[in-house]
Every structure is written in structure tokens, then in C-alpha cells.
Image (cartoon, rainbow, N blue to C red):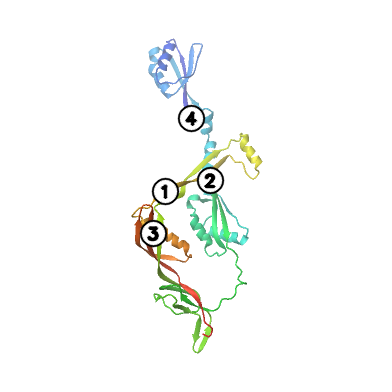
Amino acid sequence: MIGKRYEIIITGKGNKAAFLRKLSTTKAKIFQLSNVEDCIRFYTDKEGVRQIRKIRKRYDVQVKISSVEYKNGTTKILSSYYFLIACVIPLCASLFLWTIEIESTMPEVTDRIDSKLKSASIVPFTPLTKLPDEKDIRQLLMLDDPSLSWVRFKRVGTKLTIIPMLSPISSEAGKERSKPSHLVARTAGVITRFELKSGERVGRIHQTVRKGELLASGILEQGNKTTVVGAEGSVYANYWVEYSFSLPRKISYRSQGDETVRFRFHNPLDRKSKSVVKDNPKKKWSLFSLDRSIDEVKRNLTIKPGMEETLLAPLLKEQVLSEKNDNVVIVEEKILHVTFDNDKVEGTILFQLNDNIAIKKPIPQGD
């Protein structure tokens, strides 16, 4: 950043013109050459000093060499500690989360989200590298909160905006009280656990049940006394489901590419930058600004033999989970067969699911 120069003063009775001609044939650089009263003065660099010391005795000249630190306008700015500090501070600040905003018109929802974020240490001044993925934050916020149907995120620079989507409000007062019922199996399976709120177990864990078989009774019997309470709750079991699929061999999709970060310096003397702020009072003028953008890249994928385990099975697994409720767990999958032709891939996969198989069956009157 700092240019080192040397001031050269040549005097004496030697042949100064021949000395300069010889010096100009070397790699030496000569700046601001002047000749005043038989005294030659100019500036040179380190290589020029080396050449001068090498040839000065040959031309019988007296040479005075003094060091001079030279800085041009740009060099003065770039070598300034203030400039370095002004660059380092914004760059360091861009590595942290500065603002978290929750866009909600319901204060109780805002308070619940804010409390969950603090418990997970998602607060201002958190390093962006330690910020969890949006999927993990969404799962944290929606856990045990039935009022939320979805949570959207918008991140611009060092600001994170959380937009909760509220579930539609249902009126329980207008619903008729359901009739007491038994719980029966909607499909065949092997029982893994019971989660009953009321009623009495009929089946047992690890028991194989058929479709329509009684799982929990809504009638309690104590001696000769019979009470109809109705069975409520869930009965989970493992069962197999067969899925057939047909996909094109060539798939086009879009994915996120590289993130581009642009660091801009706004000249305080530039009237245009200040006029933009003047026209938009909400926009604050700053010396530096940081813009982030993520490009979308179009990609093509060709499904080939050998991708059954690495691509097709995980893809169909996500499809199955998206069609079921949140409590479904895929225990195991088996690929029965897969066929490839010129433009299609077809096959069948078996999935073993663990899900609630209990459905209500009204208790007949007179029982």
C-alpha cells in the first residue's frame, strides 16, 4: 500500500549526461528529473539505487541518496487505519443475525414464538453459521402449537422475518356430541402400542388383528354393572402398503445455486445516493451496504439402473409421508420390481408403516 522512493542528487565534475544515459538503459525508473545550477535531482526506486551505486564511480559523479515515502491519493486512503476499520466492521457485522421480526397481529402468538426462539438461543447477535435450518426452526415453532398451520421465513442480509400462518378457528360449540363408539381396526396389522383416553383394551401389543376387529371397547363392565363411556384414542400398528409408480426417466428441476454477496461503498459526496434517501424517508442512508442473493440453477437428472435404493425409494418415501398424517413412521421398505424403458421408469415398492389404525364404530343401541 505504501510506495518506497529515493531522492537522488548528482553533483561533481564527472560526465552527468553519460551517467544518465547509462542509467536509462538499465531497469532503473527515473521520476521528476530536474537540472538546476549543475545539480541533477530525480527520484527512483530500489532497483534504481542499486544501479546507481554500481556505475557512479565509472563516471566520477557524487551521488546523494535519501529515502522518501511516497503516497498517492488512492494509496493514502487504502493505507489508512480508519479505512481498514471501516471495512472490517461491516464485514464482521454481516456474519451475525442482527434483527428478528415476527409478523403477527396476535400478541399471544408473537409471545409464544419469541419464547421458543429464546429457549433455542435464536436471538440477535447469533452467528449466521450457528443458525439452524428453516426446517428445524419451523418444527420447533409448530411443536405443541395447534394454532399454527405453517411458518414462513424471509431472510434479507442480517434480518430474519418470521411469518406465522394461523390455523382456521373451529367452533366446537356448534358440533354435536359424538355418539359413544368402540374402536375397530381399519386395516390389518400388528399392534405396537395403545394411546387410549377412554375405553377398555381388547387387543394386546404384538397381536395381529384383521380389518374390522375390535381394538378397544366403549363399554365398561364392573360385576353386574355396565357403563357406556365410549372409546377414545389411538391404537398404533405396523402394516404393509404397496405403492406402484411411473416416472419419466429425464427429470428437470431447479435448485439453489451459489450465494452472491455484494459489498457496496456509498460516497458521502454523491448527491444521487442521498437523493434516494430523501425521496424515501423510511430508507436510512449508510456508508456501506451489503446485498445478498441466491441464484436458481436449472438441472437435469436421468434415472438409471442402480438408482432404486439411492433415489427412487427415498423419493417415494417422501411422497408417502406427505400423503399421511404427521404420526406415520416408515419402518421398512422393500423394492419388488423396477423396469426401465426409453422414457419411463415403472415399478412397485412395499412400505411397512406404523400408524393409528383405530376408527370409531358406534355402539348399537341396546348393548
Sequence-first disc among 3 and 1: 1
- The amino acid on which the numbered mark 3 sits, given as a three-letter code, is Ala
Q: Residue at x 44, y 23 (%)?
A: 45
Q: Mark 2 points at which residue?
A: 93
Give the Cα separation between the discs numbered 1 and 4.
51 Å
Sequence-first disc among 1 and 2: 2
Helix, strand or loop at disc 1?
strand
Label annotation for residue 313:
3
Disc 4 and disc 2 in contact, CB within 8 angstroms:
no
Helix, strand or loop at disc 3?
helix
Q: Is residue 197 visible?
A: no
Nearest the eye: 130 or 239: 239
Q: Mark 1 points at which residue?
A: 300
Give the Cα separation between the discs numbered 4 and 2.
28 Å
Q: Is residue 112 visible?
A: yes
Give the Cα separation between the discs numbered 3 and 1.
19 Å
**How many C-alpha atoms fall within 10 Å of the one at disc 4: few (<14), some, or many (≥20)?**
few
